Image (cartoon, rainbow, N blue to C red):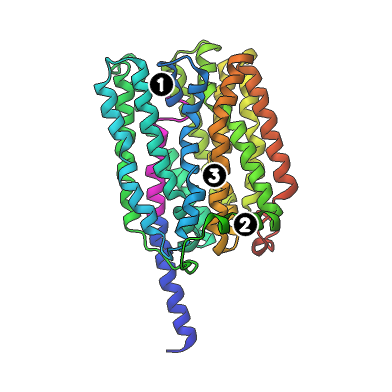
Amino acid sequence: MSVSARHIMAASLRERVYHRNFTLFTLDGILFMVAMGIIGPSTVIPDFVRRLTDSEILIGLSGNLFHAGYALPQLFVARLIVRSARKKRWFVLPNIPTRCILLVFGLLLYLLADERNELILLVFFLCYAISALGDGLVGVPWADMIGSSLDSRWRSRLYGLMSGGTALVMLAVVPLVALVLSEQGPGFPQNYALLFAASGLVFALSILPGVFLRELPGPPALERVPAFTEFLPQLGRLLRADPQFRALLVIRTLTGLFLMAAPFYIGYATLRLGLSSEVAVPTLLLMQTLGTTSGALLYMWLGARNNVLYLRLALAASVLLPLSALLAATLGPVSLALGFLISGLATSNLFFGYQNWLVEHVAPGDRPACVGLANTTSAVVTLFSPVIGGSIARLAGFETLFVVSLLLALGALMVLLRYIQRPRHLQPATSVA
């Protein structure tokens, strides 16, 4: 067999692996995101916590905790996995216990229905934090396998299809959520116990696709795990040598800060605009889902052609949610609902876009460290943003918080426009058409 024939056969085999992995990554992503959608970090969860406490800081923390817990351990994981050429076990094994935690909480909440609110809150935050931290353990190996076991053609399709498929499923799920939370539902807190149990069951199902992934070779493994005295200087060198990576960290920081307002829109709708939880939660969740569906279609088309242009448009649209909330005081709840529609369109794929750019931009050997640093930086910001957002909401009001969020979103957009460019090997594409 000639060299060219062997090359064609190898390319054909690799393409079949890409197709298989694309299907499995898509299933994993859709199941995971549907599970998250059922408990709505910016709708269902803040409303659930608000029924148990009037602490704006705890309400804000509930809406940001999963992202913070997910991203916080990633820098430490990035240091450890460099000793493994294959990352699949780092992805599959932690999923097995941690993606079942919310199912356990749903059952516990049903049993604790007659207990004090303080005990329910404690159990909720404990289970939710374990679920988030567990998912954080798999974030870096997941991103590394996305980079090594799919090529750039498949990645943008993957992110878009994950988001779009999730949105389509959620269009069927949202009426069920509305029914559970309505007066015809089982009543508080059994209604939320049912939602958490359903979410936990879907989380558990999402373990299965990862088991069947076929990992392609990535960068060679190091002989030992580098000590932090070696690892931190490596991060310093990456930061000094790459102004675009530094800019991305700033953008991720500003994004985490302007999203601190997310858990408070539902409280604004119920406390300021006079909507009941039974109306506000499913309505805003539906509008966000419709926006996510449109955003997924946009990302599937535009993300594969020009990911940076998508990020510019998404951040530009992100300023409209706090603006719509401010206008709702005059125009009524319709303005806020339209803001959630645009928010779904704008931010549903924003973090996918950041990660896709980073995977394309950095060298394969630096990918775990850069992904870990970017996500951990974002986590630290997200961890403290509820204190900031909750304090602003409590001391100065929801409206002031929304103004601050708007200004931070504008700041992120300005940094993106000034510093972030398409990866060099994608530069020849000069149009979106």
Horizontal placement of 236 versus 367: left or right? right
* Identity of the residue furthest to the right in this view: 418
Dot 2, crowdedness within 10 Å: few (<14), some or many (≥20)? few
Quick check: 194 above or below 269?
below
Q: Is residue 359 visible?
A: no
Disc with the residue nearer the chain's start (3 vs 2): 2
What percent of the width, then of the height, locates residue 41? Answer: 46, 30
Quick check: 191 above or below 316?
above
What percent of the width, then of the height, locates residue 361? Answer: 62, 58
The residue drawn where x is 67% and y is 32% is 408
What are the residue bounds of the magenta stretch? 24-44
Quadrant position of the N terminus in the picture = bottom left
Q: Which residue is mark 1?
A: 48
Asked if the residue under mark 1 is in contact with the one under mark 3, i.e. CB atoms within 8 Å, the reply is: no
Quick check: 340 above or below 316?
above
Q: Which residue is mark 3?
A: 376
Q: Which residue is mark 2?
A: 233
Pick the front one: 204 or 329: 204
Task: Find the distance from the CA under tag 3 to the CA under tag 1.
Answer: 27 Å
* Secondary structure of residue under mark 1: helix
What percent of the width, then of the height, locates residue 200? Answer: 32, 36
The residue drawn where x is 30% and y is 25% is 193
Disc with the residue nearer the chain's start (2 vs 1): 1
Dot 1, crowdedness within 10 Å: few (<14), some or many (≥20)? some
* Secondary structure of residue under mark 2: helix
Task: Find the distance from the CA under tag 3 to the CA under tag 2.
Answer: 17 Å
Quadrant position of the C terminus in the picture = bottom right
**Residue type, numbered disc 1:** Phe
> Quick check: is 75 in the magenta stretch?
no
